[in-house]
């Protein structure tokens, strides 16, 4: 880091912002193969939390690549940088007192650990959205598996590039064995169990 850059301490703290929002802040990091249901589940959870008056923000992999990370490709190095940037953005939102839902394939364990290490204890929860690749291919909502099988899309996670299953996720949501309602209920209960959100 540039030696002439210094951290400026602000008067309003994360704790102040949490008090104003009426709840603690944290990031729920949804990881899994394309088609596993990460974005669908994160979107549904945000709706539920929003209607319960929680201050939230959803960061989605495709959406972020339209702006902040539009300059990145899908090489291993750019995937790493993609996750690093999202980790830092998620940290800013947590500092702002929000409940952050981040939905990204984030295929590498080391990158996910890097993001976890950015946060204080009880501020980061890794949610592994589990679904067999065979089922993800059947769903193929974006047609990416088909393109990959046809050789039109290189380095696609699960086909031409690896996905490292989380070793110690904080929660596993299986979207093949459970429907959306069941997955939603399980995750909402998890949030309450962890006491991330209080004074409601």
Image: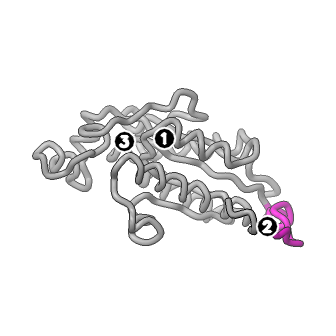
Q: Is residue 54 visible?
A: no
> CA–CA distance between discs 2 and 3?
39 Å
For residue 70, above or below residue 101: below
Q: Judging from the image, what secondary structure is the residue with disc 1 in?
A: helix
* N-term mark: 1 or 2: 2
Left or right: where 12 falls relative to 173: right
Please name the residue that numbered disc 3 is placed on: 33
* Colour theme: one colour
Q: Position of residue 51 (x, y in %)?
A: 61, 64
> CA–CA distance between discs 1 and 3?
20 Å
Q: Judging from the image, what secondary structure is the residue with disc 2 in?
A: loop
Q: Observer-nearest residue: 102 or 110?
A: 110
Please name the residue that numbered disc 2 is placed on: 6
Residues in magenta, as a range: 6-22
Residue 131: image quadrant is top left
Q: Observer-nearest residue: 198 or 104?
A: 104
Q: Judging from the image, what secondary structure is the residue with disc 3 in?
A: loop
Q: Quadrant of the N terminus?
A: bottom right
For residue 61, above or below residue 31: below
Instruction: Decide whether residue 19 is among the magenta residues.
Output: yes
Camera-side mark, 1 or 3: 3
Please name the residue that numbered disc 1 is placed on: 182
**In the displayed image of the protein, which residue is found farthest to the right?**
11
Q: Residues within 10 Å of mark 3 (few under 14, many from 20)?
A: many
* N-term mark: 1 or 3: 3
Residue 6: image quadrant is bottom right
Q: Residues within 10 Å of mark 1 (few under 14, many from 20)?
A: few
Q: Position of residue 180 (x, y in %)?
A: 43, 46
Residue at 14 percent of width and 42 percent of height: 149
Camera-side mark, 2 or 3: 2
């Amino acid at each position: 880091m540039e030696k002439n850059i210094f951290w400026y301490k602000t008067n309003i703290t994360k704790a102040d912002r949490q008090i104003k929002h009426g709840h603690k802040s944290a990031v729920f990091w949804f990881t899994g193969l394309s088609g596993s249901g990460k974005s669908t589940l994160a979107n549904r959870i945000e709706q539920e939390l929003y209607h319960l008056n929680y201050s939230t923000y959803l960061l989605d992999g495709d959406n972020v690549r339209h702006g902040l990370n539009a300059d990145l490709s899908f090489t291993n190095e750019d995937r790493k940088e993609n996750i690093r940037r999202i980790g830092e953005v998620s940290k800013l939102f947590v500092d702002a007192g929000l409940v952050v839902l981040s939905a990204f394939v984030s295929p590498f364990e080391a990158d996910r650990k890097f993001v976890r290490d950015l946060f204080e204890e009880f501020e980061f929860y890794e949610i592994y959205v589990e679904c067999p690749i065979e089922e993800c291919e059947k769903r193929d909502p974006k047609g990416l598996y088909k393109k990959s099988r046809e050789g039109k899309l290189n380095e696609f996670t699960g086909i031409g590039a690896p996905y490292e299953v989380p070793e110690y996720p904080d929660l596993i949501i299986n979207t093949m064995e459970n429907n959306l309602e069941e997955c939603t209920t399980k995750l909402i209960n998890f949030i309450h169990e962890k006491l991330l959100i209080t004074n409601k």
